Image (cartoon, grey):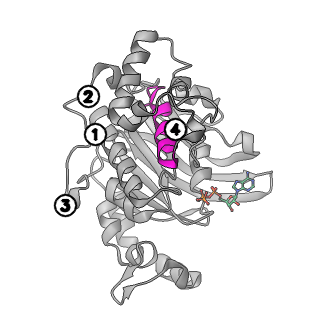
């Protein structure tokens, strides 16, 4: 672990404050309406089809945050992470590790849960964003896709997608153009566009939730557990679309996932959370090869397959900290 951490802290292109040089105010997926870019960062492909390195400057910087719910329940105990422009960053960990809380701290959705960031700081494009209204975060280009899909069940798929554009002031033609772009990434949604969202499949609802977020023309999507409850083939399909959106539209992702295997195949960089702390981080390709990650999160060790549940947590802790 310490090796991985050391390498990460000194990775090339990791210029602290790099984001501060960039203008504030979301470009918010400006590429969408203009069509796919050919010079989009993040297209370098390494072994196994995964991107070789995390590209770009830091967009989002979470620095040593502590989150407390209901004034007493300490859930995040000093989490630091960053998301680079044009990157897919995975936030991994088991049930209750604090992944959703981290995403909500960034999108400022904690307040509705009686949660509060009590220490540390969060910067987006160099500007402190703690305490901003969630709608202001959307304006700056950061939107969260909540765990569990959260569609408006009584609206059609298309109406759901259009709700994502309600803050936009750039006119119906641009919105119609982006709707077509969303359909080009999610052809299933085009087929089901007149169906009531509540009657569509789990996979289609997940696609609708991502598509709705895209309609706000985001620069960064905070995507919470997209694989939850979906069949493996659909999970692959959805992650494949996330990868295309990243590569072709330049959307950056912070992706919370329990499914370490699939997340590390598609992400550039990963953080592993346990009990509200980052216990390991590194380029996804390195994490995939790390013996502890293999054993505890991918269920594979030198002795053969193992269930994460079979490993007593004190032993894991000893290994993480050694
Ligand atoms: P999961 O994949 O199960 O959602 P997670 O890693 O996303 O897990 P969180 O949902 O962030 O974890 O939860 C972290 C801890 O915070 C858990 O112990 C959870 O019980 C607690 N928690 C989450 N939301 C609240 C809340 N609104 N009030 C009090 N405690 C909460």
> Do residues under tags 4 and 1 come within 8 Å of each other at their CB atoms?
no
Q: Position of residue 239 (x, y in %)?
A: 37, 50
Q: Answer with mark 4 or mark 1, whichever residue precedes in sequence.
A: 4
At a point 40% along the width and 10% down the height, the residue shown is 173
The secondary structure that most of the magenta stretch takes on is helix
The answer to whether residue 219 of the structure is visible from this angle is no
- Disc 2 versus disc 1: distance between alpha carbons? 9 Å
Q: Residue at label 3?
A: 47
Eye-nearest disc, 4 or 1: 4
Q: Answer with mark 4 or mark 2, whichever residue precedes in sequence.
A: 2
User: Is 255 located above or below residue 137 in the figure?
Assistant: below
> Do residues under tags 3 and 1 come within 8 Å of each other at their CB atoms?
no
The label number, if any, that marks residue 209 in the structure image: 4
Element type at marker 1? helix
Mark 4 burial class by Cα count in 10 Å: few <14, some 14-19, many 20+: many
Q: Answer with mark 3 or mark 1, whichever residue precedes in sequence.
A: 3
Q: Position of residue 233 (x, y in %)?
A: 37, 57
Residue 34 as seen in the image, left or right of residue 175:
left
Q: Residue at label 1?
A: 247
Q: Which residues are magenta?
A: 201-218
Quarter of the image where ligand 1 sits = bottom right
Mark 1 burial class by Cα count in 10 Å: few <14, some 14-19, many 20+: many
Eye-nearest disc, 4 or 2: 4
Q: Answer with mark 3 or mark 4, whichever residue precedes in sequence.
A: 3
């Amino acid at each position: 672990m310490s090796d991985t951490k050391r390498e990460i802290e000194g990775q090339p292109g990791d210029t602290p404050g790099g984001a501060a040089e960039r203008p504030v105010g979301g470009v918010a997926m400006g590429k969408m309406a203009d069509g796919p870019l050919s010079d989009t960062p993040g297209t370098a492909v390494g072994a196994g089809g995964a991107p070789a390195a995390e590209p770009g400057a830091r967009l989002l910087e979470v620095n040593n945050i502590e989150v407390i719910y209901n004034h007493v329940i300490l859930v995040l105990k000093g989490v630091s992470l960053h998301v680079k422009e044009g990157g897919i960053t995975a936030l991994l960990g088991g049930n209750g590790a604090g992944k959703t809380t981290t995403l909500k701290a960034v999108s400022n959705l904690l307040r509705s849960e009686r949660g509060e960031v009590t220490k540390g700081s969060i910067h987006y494009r160099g500007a402190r964003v703690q305490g901003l209204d969630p709608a202001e975060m959307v304006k700056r280009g950061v939107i969260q896709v909540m765990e569990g899909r959260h569609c408006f069940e009584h609206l059609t798929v298309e109406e759901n997608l259009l709700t994502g554009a309600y803050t936009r002031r750039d006119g119906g033609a641009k919105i119609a153009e982006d709707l077509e772009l969303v359909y080009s990434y999610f052809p299933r949604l085009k087929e089901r566009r007149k169906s009531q969202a509540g009657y569509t499949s789990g996979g289609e609802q997940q696609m609708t939730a991502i598509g709705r977020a895209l309609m706000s023309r985001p620069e960064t999507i905070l995507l919470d557990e997209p694989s939850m409850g979906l069949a493996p083939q659909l999970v692959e399909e959805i992650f494949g679309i996330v990868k295309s959106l990243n590569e072709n539209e330049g959307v950056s992702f912070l992706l919370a996932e329990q499914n370490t295997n699939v997340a590390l195949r598609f992400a550039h960089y990963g953080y592993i959370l346990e009990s509200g702390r980052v216990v390991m981080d590194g380029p996804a390709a390195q994490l995939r090869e790390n013996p502890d990650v293999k054993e505890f999160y991918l269920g594979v060790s030198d002795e053969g397959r193992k269930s994460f549940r079979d490993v007593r947590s004190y032993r894991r802790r000893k290994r993480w900290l050694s």
